[in-house]
Image (spheres, grey):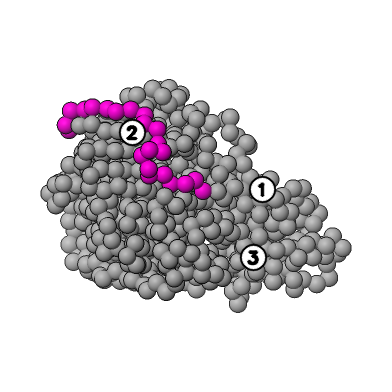
Amino acid sequence: MSTETYRDVWGIPHLRAGSARELAFAQGRNAALDRAWQIEVERHRARGTSASFLGADALGWDRFVRRARLEDTARRCFTALERRDAETAAWVRAYVDGVNEGLPEGARRTPEFATVGLGPGRWNPWTPLGVWLGAHILFAGFPAKLWREEVVRHLGQDAVPLFATDGPGTSGSNGWLVTGDRTATGSPVIAGDPHRFIEAPGVYQQVHLSCPEFDVVGLAVPGVPGIAHFGHTGTVAWAITNAMADYQDLYRERLRRSDDGGLVEALDPDGQWRPASRHLEVVEVADGDPVEVEVVETARGPVIIDGDEAGDAGPVSLRYPPRVTEDLGFGALLPLLRARRVADVDRAFDGWAEPVNVVQAADTEGGLLHRVAGRVPVRDPRNGTRIVPAWEPAHTWRGWYAPMPRADVDGFAVMANQRGPATPLGVEFAAPHRADRLRTLLDTRSDWSAPDMAALHTDTRLGSAASLLDLVAGLEGLDADCAALRGRLLDWDRRMEADSTGAAAFAAVRGAVVRRLAAHPALAALTSPPAYPEVFHPWLALLPRVAYALENLLTARELYGIDRAAIVAEALAEVAANPPEGTWGDTHRLAPWRAVPDPSYDGKEPGLAGDHDCVLCTSAVPGLTDRAARGPAARYVWDLACREDSLWVVPFGASGVPGAPHHRDQLPLWLAGGLAPVVTDWNRLTKENEEHHDEQ
């Protein structure tokens, strides 16, 4: 086969081939050359083998992956894909062949391999499915059910809504669709930014894929073929956000063992004890002893918390759709690339499975789409909020929710993880502040253009500030220093700008309030996380829960006798006595995740504007740290009037190779809220090579 690789001035790969399968090979090879370290880390994470070179810090994740049977699920899903959709399976195989060809060279270019003594591995046909599953298995936030169990146990059922919010460990996004009657060109514009943990290199790769069947630009997930989430084919464009749906269940199991422990039986809903599968696996740990992991699976699903970790309550199993259906939705990927109209995108997303998303799409003929896509089981409402007894028939799955919800588009439509079309499918959603702010801004004019979207991407108005500032305004009997600080806060414009001293003061007071609430004796029972596996601890720590639910906690009619005004007054006094010396950006700094920490960046990453409830969603954990680990993992603007007027940017750059010219060259643009032009004219690109390979 023959393929061509071109680059634009940002080093973004533009790939051209003679067929869809040849193009998949080229995409896989490019991912291996540009992102070798990243995709190999993800392959190991999907297999539960990352501790073998990352050390004991990765053991908790590896243990969870083994117990949850992620690689086995990916293998089963690929086998089923071969049976259901041979063309897509062959296309995935071609991508994997390209990865395997490019990995040796990609590994030679990337110093992290030598740093940890890791050689490039061999990808299997199901590896991209494992990478996808590993990246999204926690997307629905099922560990929040463990948190609710603890809240109910210690404070009662009425306390659960107090802590309900878009909390630790979840991933969201902003997205908006503006119809042609609200744009300067008369054609729709789709824009937004996915919010995820910021990783270096980035979790999205800008790419252009072209063959006789299709020509698509978009944001790909390295290690996975095609363009699943955000794409523009020239005549139709689409984008997604996390629907915040609940589609994974936790079951409390009753297990009994033979005397030697080798045979395990589980109590099923019909009252019968039936054998559960059981085997042992060994996780290798760099600079440590191997760790043996028992893998048990009942009719509900794999046991992810054993009896010792669950205390007296008993082991817990996880039931998640791909394990049940052997389908990750990869059958939608080729139809998306081939889409010409909104109807094509709609049909493609009918086959979507994991994760559950809200989709927006528009085409050049006026077609519009705003719907939910994915697979959500029908079951008892209690399954959505708590761990439920595996032996009770009421909690079994009873088919799939259908049809998936849709919404009309009138002028514009906004998706920001708030309650909306997906409301019937979820339990907790993001606070409405980002969505409300976007609607307010979009409603100010009817001549929007693609370049105008940057101002929306970077809006820093903090709607959730009101709950705390209202309490500050009501304080009486303050000394001079506290009164002066109160005046500054009430005069502040409520914008979390990086150069704002007012934002810094507000954040300092907010953090002090969070710490005091979390330390209050009324909540003391929640301060020590239960003995669940460490991978779930981000969902179980009290301080982050208080931080993200602060608005609810401050505005609830009553909070277990806590004098919130007194707490705010104490926090104000603390900050007045030791005020922040600089601006919000001095402490609110980017903190990207790197599989291997790089000391050369310690303390040197840039300051950021924005905050958790701003449209510019750069999330820290108030009360713990101002450093932002989550934020816009990309920004995009899809213009349906002319694709070359579209825009995009990622936090770092196209290359995952440290020191390469395009490793971090987009960072200044991303920080400034700028966007790079999307280029699809081959005459404006630089040809890199022409490779010839045997047909795979």
Instruction: Please report the bounds of the magenta region as a residue range.
Output: 675-696
Q: CA distance from mark 2 to mark 1?
A: 39 Å
**How far is mark 1 from mark 3, CA to CA?**
18 Å
Report the amino acid beneath label 2.
Thr
**Residue occupying the point 24% across, 50% down:** 334
N-term-proximal mark, 2 vs 1: 2
Tell me what residue is drawn at x 21 percent, y 27 percent: 693
In the drawing, what numbered circle is on residue 601? none
Q: Is residue 496 left or right of residue 154?
A: right
Q: Which part of the image, by quadrant, shows the N terminus?
A: top left
| Amino acid type assigned to the residue bearing label 3 in the image | Ala
Q: Residue 585 — which label?
A: 1
On residue 465, which mark appears?
A: 3
Note whether 464 is above or below 659 in the view shown.
below
Position of residue 49 relative to residue 616, above or below, is above
Of circles 1 and 3, which is in front? 1
Circles 2 and 3, Cβ within 8 Å, touching? The answer is no
